[in-house]
Image: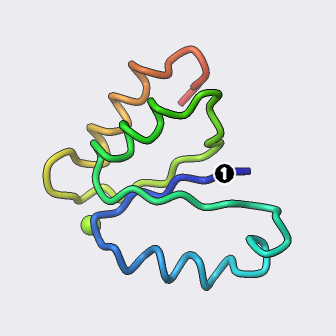
Amino acid sequence: MNILIVDDETDVEILFRQKFRKEIKKGEISLSFAFSGQEALDFLEQENPPQVVYVFSDINMPGMTGLELLKKLRNVFHKSMSA
Ligand SMILES: [Mg+2]
């Protein structure tokens, strides 16, 4: 299960990788990171077939906010999203 985490603070990658160290090692989950809304969209659009099951996003980010990202995700991936 691949999870995409979106946050403009790059430190979150280290924190998440530490927190889920065991699950990652066992292959239960894999984590992907994007550090802006645009980076998240680019990442998801290039995935074929899509691998990401969950997207967790910060709200306050420079450029595209988390809420704007959510709106765009709904437009681009509306067929597979019910949010
Ligand atoms: Mg932030």
Give the x, y percent position of residue 5. Answer: 48, 58
Q: Quadrant of residue 16?
A: bottom right
Q: Is residue 69 left or right of residue 77?
A: left
- Percent of width and height locating residue 60: 23, 59
Q: Nearer the viewer, residue 40 or 68?
A: 40
Snapshot colouring: rainbow
Residue furthest to the top: 79
Secondary structure at badge 1 equals strand
Q: Position of residue 51 (x, y in %)?
A: 65, 39
Name the residue carrying label 1: 2
**82 to the left or right of 44:** right
Residue placed most toward the observer, 68 or 36:
36
Above or below, 5 relative to 48: below
Q: Quadrant of residue 72?
A: top left
Please tell me in which quarter of the rendered image ligand 1 is found: bottom left
Outermost right residue? 26
| Residue at 42% across, 76% down | 12
Give, as a three-letter code, the residue at label 1: Asn
Q: Residue at x 47, y 32 (%)?
A: 46
In this image, 37 relative to 3: left or right?
A: left
- Kindly tell me whether mark 1's CB lies below 8 Å from ligand 1: no
- Residue 17 at what x, y percent from top left? 59, 77
Mark 1 residue crowding within 10 angstroms, few (<14) / some (14–19) / many (20+): some
Measured along the vertical axis of the image, is residue 28 above or below residue 55?
below
Between 40 and 75, the one nearer to me in the picture: 40
Q: Is residue 77 placed above or below 59 in the rendered structure?
A: above
Residue name at image x 22 percent, y 58 percent: 61
Which residue is rendered at x = 41% and y = 30% of the image?
Answer: 73
Number of callouts in the render?
A: 1
